[in-house]
Amino acid sequence: MKKYETPLLDELEKGPWPSFVKEIKTAATKSEMANDELGQLEKSYRDKRGYWKHGGIVGVLGYGGGVIGRYSSLPEEFPGVAHFHTVRINQPSGMYYKTDSLRTILDLWDEYGSGLTNMHGSTGDMVLLGCRTEALEPLFAEVSSRGWDLGGSGSALRTPACCLGQSRCEWANIDTMDICNELTQTYQDYVHRPAWPYKFKFKIAGCAIDCVASIARADCSVIGTWKGKIAVDQDVVKDYAKAGMNITEEIVNMCPTGCMSYDGKELKIDDTNCSRCMHCISKMTKALRPTGEKGASILIGSKAPIVVGSLLSWVVVPFIKMEPPYTEFKALVEKMWDWWDDNAKPRERIGEVIEMKGMRSFLEAIGVPPQPQQVFEPRKDPFFFWKEEDLNGNK
Amino acid sequence: MKKYETPLLDELEKGPWPSFVKEIKTAATKSEMANDELGQLEKSYRDKRGYWKHGGIVGVLGYGGGVIGRYSSLPEEFPGVAHFHTVRINQPSGMYYKTDSLRTILDLWDEYGSGLTNMHGSTGDMVLLGCRTEALEPLFAEVSSRGWDLGGSGSALRTPACCLGQSRCEWANIDTMDICNELTQTYQDYVHRPAWPYKFKFKIAGCAIDCVASIARADCSVIGTWKGKIAVDQDVVKDYAKAGMNITEEIVNMCPTGCMSYDGKELKIDDTNCSRCMHCISKMTKALRPTGEKGASILIGSKAPIVVGSLLSWVVVPFIKMEPPYTEFKALVEKMWDWWDDNAKPRERIGEVIEMKGMRSFLEAIGVPPQPQQVFEPRKDPFFFWKEEDLNGNK
Amino acid sequence: MAWLTDQEAKAKRKTDIGPPHYSKMLPPVITKNYGKWKYHEELTPGSMVHVAESGDKIYTVRVASPRILATANIRAMLDIADKYCDGYIRWTTRNNVEFMTSKEENVPLIKKAAEAAGYPAGGIGAGLSNMVHTQGWVHCHGAASDASGLVKAIMDEVFPYFNEKRLPAKTRLALACCVNMCGAVHCSDIAVVAIHRKVPTIDHDSVKNLCEIPTTVGACPTRAISPDPAKKSVKINADKCMYCGNCFTVCPPINIHNPEQDGVAIVVGGKVGSLRTGPKFSKLAIPYIKNNPPRWPEVVSAVKSIIDTYAKDARKHERVGEWVERIGWESFFKKTGIEFTYQHIDDFTFARDTFRTSAAFKW
Amino acid sequence: MAWLTDQEAKAKRKTDIGPPHYSKMLPPVITKNYGKWKYHEELTPGSMVHVAESGDKIYTVRVASPRILATANIRAMLDIADKYCDGYIRWTTRNNVEFMTSKEENVPLIKKAAEAAGYPAGGIGAGLSNMVHTQGWVHCHGAASDASGLVKAIMDEVFPYFNEKRLPAKTRLALACCVNMCGAVHCSDIAVVAIHRKVPTIDHDSVKNLCEIPTTVGACPTRAISPDPAKKSVKINADKCMYCGNCFTVCPPINIHNPEQDGVAIVVGGKVGSLRTGPKFSKLAIPYIKNNPPRWPEVVSAVKSIIDTYAKDARKHERVGEWVERIGWESFFKKTGIEFTYQHIDDFTFARDTFRTSAAFKW
Ligand code: SRM
Ligand code: SRM
Ligand code: SRM
Ligand code: SRM
Ligand code: SF4
Ligand code: SF4
Ligand code: SF4
Ligand code: SF4
Ligand code: SF4
Ligand code: SF4
Ligand code: SF4
Ligand code: SF4
């Protein structure tokens, strides 16, 4: 069913990396929508510009989000993409799928949409790429009746995401997939009905390695950690040395706190000075193992650059236990939302509001005391403020 | 001539550190002004607050600066300090004095003022502490007729200052005292007649050790440096080792660029990676010595915290030759002043204006190209601006 | 299958049920050893094994994906999973596909099958993984460049680092098609960010019919837009505009696209993990390369050359940003031969902390 | 001597001649070896020798000074310089006095004479030097504490580190009597900064007579002051005021002094040289200690305790800031036992860069 000549896009079928052009062409064998997507894209390649208009509000009954409206600016030329909305299907935590379960979605998508997907969107959703407005309600009914739901969009809680954690990783200090699922389920209303000043994202990583980039792109980054020693199996250390690892160079000298030493035989760690950065553990996974109490650090505020420049998340709660049903954590998060909702202008993320109002206002609202772990360094300028209640003590 | 009981201040005569109270008392034996200074100060100690009003404009004919007006807020109680202005006498570069020459000033000051001094003020002036308005003109006549002049105050060029440089230091890459003197002399008009948006300070250090703290407190910091190798006298290295220096720990491991190595015999430096930080040289002065071309880095903008927080000076010109009469340097500085004068709001230091208008505007005005040495790191956000002239090239 | 009628749909639909519980999606060996993994070993750039305290093992074969996947091709992957992996599959946080099995002998078979389907194995350990990216001209209105095409062109070129050659450390590439930067582009070892470079043009005559003035004014994140009552239109303060394109989203007569001037910037040195050194933002390396579809050769070779310089110069375990910080940015520009321009010097709110406040630097 | 008359003064005065040329002030051995020094050696904490390429030597004895000096006492120093130093003397950039001689045998004699005059030798090498400071209640209207008195009290306590005991590296103490921070206080190893803590009070009735409203409004660096036409006075926005006292300077009915609330903060970890690590600002250690003249025992013991912790814990050549950065600020607060408060957390323009953006830190 080839409809368009695509000499430019055809160039992108060459080479070893899997080709998205092949994917679109595959879908185009069955879908007019995919075919017109191909045609319009070829034109974009020729003209070096996109041809999409914005969304407008499209969605499903009773939900304020989960669908991104998209219309071609050349609907006459490419009628198949006149409407080309995306549907965000909330992924199961950890992005594991039983094949049957996933096939259900694929079948429905062939029926109602373009047959193109993103596995996955940057936030974590399964993104179904391209359908018409009138397909949304029936598609949603089909999908939801089979146990799936939409993810977030707009000024809502966005689909939480996590690293695979304890499911397959030896370093997970917390059950990331359970936390992710629990938050998604508890806060369904916030996911589906945008009611906040702007978006809010959770990402949960099992350790400081942060395989879900939570510290860079979540308003609330939950990062597993521990309080205790790193157990060292000296026999295995010897194996690593024998296998050719230069322990001094690769491990000891790269430890950021300088808290390790190695005399060619024994590897010693001064645990009180370890910052739990995970370098040594990740490079000598058979020999080193965190022990003691497990929990998470809560960091707040990361986001993309618009308007004030990108933010990375800031340590707010250095340590919190994370055990189901995560009552303490949820109470904390709800206090954060209340404060944010009260203080934000429209389109202000929580990190931006903290920057505007000051960390003290935020900490007081959520009941967390000031701690040196929250900062890299104390302030430099002498312009600090005093509240009446400070003036009597030495605060 | 004891006039006041000073039980609190008397406490500060005890202890091994020289006592300013003794100094004031010494002066008070001859001067009523010093006596009342003592009395008012005791009251401040009792009441835990100062008793000074501000200045108002006092000064000498034809000059707009050099004198800081000061009046007691308790003139009836302490008539000797009803007027208590300070006179800033421009120090000779390097703060060396022939004793006779300095005695001249002391004699005059006993006659016209309180007999109290600051040797020196933080900017570098000899500060004569406390005289009456009517003493200013005759004092100035006496002082200037003997070859001395006032230093700066107000929105003027402030008295330049320098480290002692080549006069007694083996590391001075430039003749700091000559540069300091030359700038002071060339720009006398700017020192004496405030005509700028705010103050402007020069400080000149012979090397990156910066014994005059130029990088922290000068709008224009001139810091000597070199382009070339560090010569190593390996025999002397051996002497240091023999004398007990742990060269690996104290030198090699503390080199910030990691460009040194030591095998117990020879000390090697990879000069292309040396940042000329001066650590190794200062710790092994007999063994190490910079060679090659000498000159200075010009850094701009440091100041105290009000209003936007303290600034340290920023590298603007990584390297410039500094040879008398410093024509290239002076031309550069004059371009800076022009740009500053054109762009500053009142009371905006040059560093603040660069921050407001952007480094590009400043660099273009002074004709210095962008260079990676000017920054620790390039920008993080993607919001950079393009001028029409950039859009055709790949700039 | 036929579309549900409105009524059928209403009857059938459920709301607020959330996604299926992950426990239904896990291979049995994972359910059994959940939270009890002991260590892992990389076997090849495309496979690894995790060993549980129980002694159980799970082998993972990771394969490349273009992220845009047609349902038909996903089905082909599911077939492989059915054949070798007891009917389970997963996607990674960087859009690769993972096939897991307890049977070591399946590893080469999975690899072969996936490669036959067009999805080569790789991406594990100290090398390149998949390139995180966004929508581009395929779907987003604001895109200043395509996403998938650039990724394809780049990954073709650096492919050996994905499936074979090793680098000093994991190296994360990413691409965003506008400054909204969907994805963790701002903290990548090397990222491509598409940028517009000119203030949008306004077709004032159409504005009054097609746009809501307050909405248009409100859409600008930097408050560069204000009403222009005389023209019954809006005006843009060029000094404040940073070419984001949001205005164009809400008001079609405003046009941000400029085929001659749109293009990409390259940023380098970011990371997100806290290992060794903390998370870092990527910093500007190349402020602009023009769009040159379909294969953007200038961008491809710039990315390649940065990777090659890093590969040659960095120490083992050193991420790109750690390498650059050790040698200094002045050396980075020297070693890569990249020109340093006015655009590199920060003039944004946080410029101050990037200006060099030290007399120590390299020539 | 009698005062010049107006006329005499007019006749005599010269203008714009600048200071005397330094060459007239230099000891002959310096003139001869200018720019040709080869190395130096510290002999004692109060003396050192510089050796020129010619082989010439110059011995320097450095002595303490309270900076406020009475003419009579300066004369005593000049007498010593005449006796042992061929009539030359100098002051250092930190307000110490230096006696220089080419005769080694003069060194102990100079020391003795200076000590007899009340000015002990010290301040050279890895220890404490003089404490840079400002005017305080002795002369400045804005001072939130005294300067000289605090310096005296502190230096008395830590005196052994000036003239005898050594520290890991040079350690620079400083004091500023208000947030204008005259001196390089903001980049000192340990500095005391006097602060007000309350928004100024206004005697509205006097304002109309004693102040110019526009000048008063203009004096506020943070624009916290605006006219209050109703009261014919001004009002202060408490949220913007950072207690600098500038308003009080230009308008006496505004009062910033508050004997019960004025006091000092202690900041630590700054440096200005580029050796090893770049110049650093000092950071807040203790946000407030109340004024307790004449000897401020709480301040003295806080400074002492920080120095002692540093002396015990730092490595050789490590400045205070380098030590703190190596161990981490969280360890600094732990080791010193200093309480961490809301004031420590930056809420100023550049707060963002101080917030910890890493999952790695110490308990
Ligand atoms: C689909 C997706 C990109 C992708 O190709 O994967 C996406 C697509 C869009 N993003 Fe995004 N964002 C997507 C993940 C992200 C992420 C990454 C993440 O969530 O981990 C970020 C960076 C993190 C963050 O939240 O800051 C991100 C930061 C933005 C921003 C900037 C927000 C900010 O505060 O700076 C915008 C602009 C906005 O909100 O108006 C934005 C806006 C958009 C819009 C809705 C464009 C718009 O202005 O209306 C895009 C719709 C594109 C389309 O037509 O399909 N998108 N967006 C991702 C969502 C898929 C999913 O649900 O899984
Ligand atoms: C006398 C001296 C302090 C001392 O005890 O040594 C001094 C004293 C004053 N300084 Fe200063 N400053 C003195 C060196 C400095 C320095 C250090 C330096 O120059 O190296 C600084 C920090 C560097 C800088 O310039 O930023 C300094 C930063 C300030 C500021 C803050 C300026 C700023 O841009 O942030 C002010 C406030 C102002 O200008 O209104 C100030 C204002 C003042 C005033 C004029 C107070 C005022 O608001 O009117 C003080 C007069 C005190 C008096 O009554 O004697 N003084 N002042 C120093 C000058 C003596 C000399 O000429 O040698
Ligand atoms: C005399 C003086 C210059 C002047 O023109 O007056 C001077 C003179 C010397 N300095 Fe300095 N420095 C002088 C102020 C400074 C300053 C400025 C300040 O304190 O405000 C600094 C910067 C401090 C900082 O970084 O915060 C300074 C940081 C140094 C250092 C670096 C110390 C470090 O490890 O960071 C050295 C090198 C060393 O100690 O090995 C040094 C080395 C030297 C040498 C050895 C240079 C030489 O070869 O002659 C001189 C004698 C050292 C000594 O006193 O131990 N000098 N020195 C100043 C004496 C002040 C005083 O009375 O104590
Ligand atoms: C599967 C995945 C998690 C998931 O839930 O999907 C995962 C899995 C593992 N990561 Fe990761 N990481 C995954 C995304 C990430 C990310 C996130 C990202 O790239 O957006 C990061 C942060 C990158 C950064 O800092 O910018 C990440 C940084 C690491 C690191 C740290 C590398 C470093 O030196 O900085 C390690 C440890 C190591 O390599 O020694 C690691 C180690 C691991 C281990 C060994 C953990 C374990 O014991 O199982 C897993 C296999 C390693 C491998 O692929 O080489 N993983 N890993 C993600 C695979 C993405 C992919 O397809 O390539
Ligand atoms: S973030 Fe930590 S726990 Fe999670 S997958 Fe990565 S290494 Fe494992
Ligand atoms: S986890 Fe990091 S800080 Fe701790 S010992 Fe290992 S490398 Fe050092
Ligand atoms: S700054 Fe350098 S040249 Fe000047 S006195 Fe100090 S060490 Fe010597
Ligand atoms: S001057 Fe500094 S950077 Fe250069 S070799 Fe010496 S210690 Fe290293
Ligand atoms: S980065 Fe920009 S253009 Fe690309 S998908 Fe996100 S919002 Fe759209
Ligand atoms: S492109 Fe962005 S910044 Fe520029 S006017 Fe439009 S909305 Fe504002
Ligand atoms: S620091 Fe403040 S109070 Fe002290 S002298 Fe300077 S301006 Fe005056
Ligand atoms: S104390 Fe300073 S900041 Fe406060 S109102 Fe007065 S001038 Fe403004």
Image: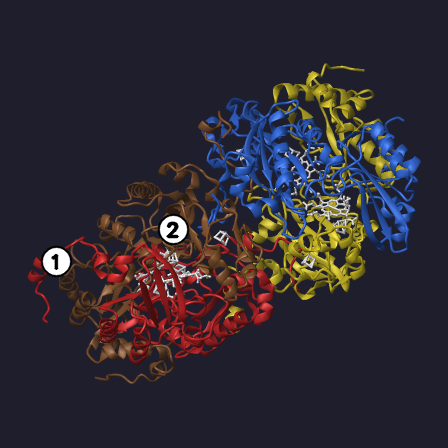
Chain colours: A brown, B yellow, C red, D blue
Vertical side of C113 occupied by B50: above or below? above
Q: What is the number of callouts on the image?
A: 2
**Would residue D216 be seen by someone viewing this image from the given angle?**
yes
- Residue B38 drawn at (x, y percent): 73, 21
The picture places residue B359, in percent across and down from the top left corner, at: 58, 57
A352 or B336: nearer the viewer: A352
Question: Label 1 belongs to which residue?
Answer: C13
Foreground: disc 2 or disc 1:
2
Badge 2 local density, few (<14 within 10 Å), some, or many (20+)?
Answer: many
**Does mark 1's beta carbon lie closer than 8 Å to ligand 1?**
no
Whether residue C217 sits left or right of residue D165 in the image: it is left
Who is closer to the viewer here, C119 or A48? C119
- The three-letter amino acid code for the residue at tag 2 is Ile
Where does residue D193 sit, x and y in percent of width and height?
A: 61, 34
Label 2 residue SS: strand
Is disc 2 in contact with disc 1, using a CB cutoff of under 8 Å?
Answer: no
Q: How would you rate the neighbour count of disc 1 (Cα within 10 Å): few for under 14, some for 14-19, many for 20 or more?
A: many
The chain letter under disc 1 is: C
Q: In the rendered image of this protein, does residue A9 appear above or below residue B286?
A: below
Q: Is mark 2 within 8 Å of ligand 5?
A: yes
Q: Is residue A278 left or right of residue A178?
A: right
> How many angstroms separate mark 2 from mark 1 (CA)?
36 Å
- Residue lying at the far front in this picture: please name it: A235
Is the residue D220 above or below the residue C264 in the image?
above
Decide: is C176 above or below D37: below
- According to the image, label 2 marks what residue? A223
Label 2: chain letter? A
Q: Which x, y percent locates residue C180? A: 38, 61
Three-letter amino acid code at the position of disc 1: Arg
Q: Where does ligand 2 appear, by image quarter?
A: top right
